[in-house]
Amino acid sequence: MPQPRKPAARQELSGSWKKNPQRRREEPEVTAPIGTAPKALSTGAKRAWREITKHANWLTAADRHILEIACVMIDQHRRDELPVTALTQLRGALGQLGLTPADRSKVPAGKKKEKSNPFEGLGGNAAH
C-alpha cells in the first residue's frame, strides 16, 4: 500500500522542496467556514457536528462531507447501533479531519504572533 501524500504545508516545514523546487505543487486553499450542520442530519448527528466544530476551528467548507459521515457514525456509536467493524472507519474519518491526538499534530497551526517588547521605544541610555 503506498504511503499517503503529505500536505504541502508539511512538506514546506520539512524542507522537502529544497533539493528539487520543481516538485512543489499548489494545493487549493479553502477559506469558507464549515457552517452549520446539514438539515438532513438526525438530532444526535447535529449534536456531534456542534461538538466537533466548536473545538476544530481548522475545518472548512471542503470538510463538510467527511464531517457529515463522521457525525452520522458518532451518533450511531452513541446509540450502540454502529457495528464494531465500522469503528475503524470512524477512526479513519476522524483522523482525516485531524481529530485524533496523532493526527492533530499534523494540522498546521496558525501563524504565531511575534512577541512585542513592552520596553521598546521607551528610550533611555543603556550605558552607565
Image: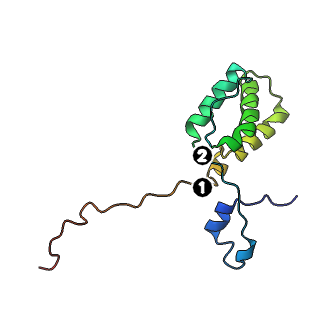
Q: Is residue 117 left or right of residue 40?
A: left
Residue type for callout 2? Trp
| Residue 46 versus residue 58 in the image, above or below | above
Q: Which mark is residue 108?
A: 1
Q: Position of residue 41 (x, y in %)?
A: 73, 24
For the residues marked 1 and 2, what is the alpha-carbon distance in whole angstroms? 9 Å
Helix, strand or loop under label 2: loop
Residue type for callout 1? Pro
Q: Position of residue 53 (x, y in %)?
A: 60, 36
> Which quadrant of the structure image shows residue 1?
bottom right
User: Toward the viewer: 84 or 62?
Assistant: 62
User: Toward the viewer: 38 or 89?
Assistant: 38
> Which quadrant of the structure image shows residue 87?
top right
Q: Is residue 113 left or right of residue 127?
A: right
Check whether the beta carbons of the residues at disc 1 and disc 2 lie within 8 A of each other. yes
Q: Which mark is residue 58?
A: 2
N-terminal label among 1 and 2: 2
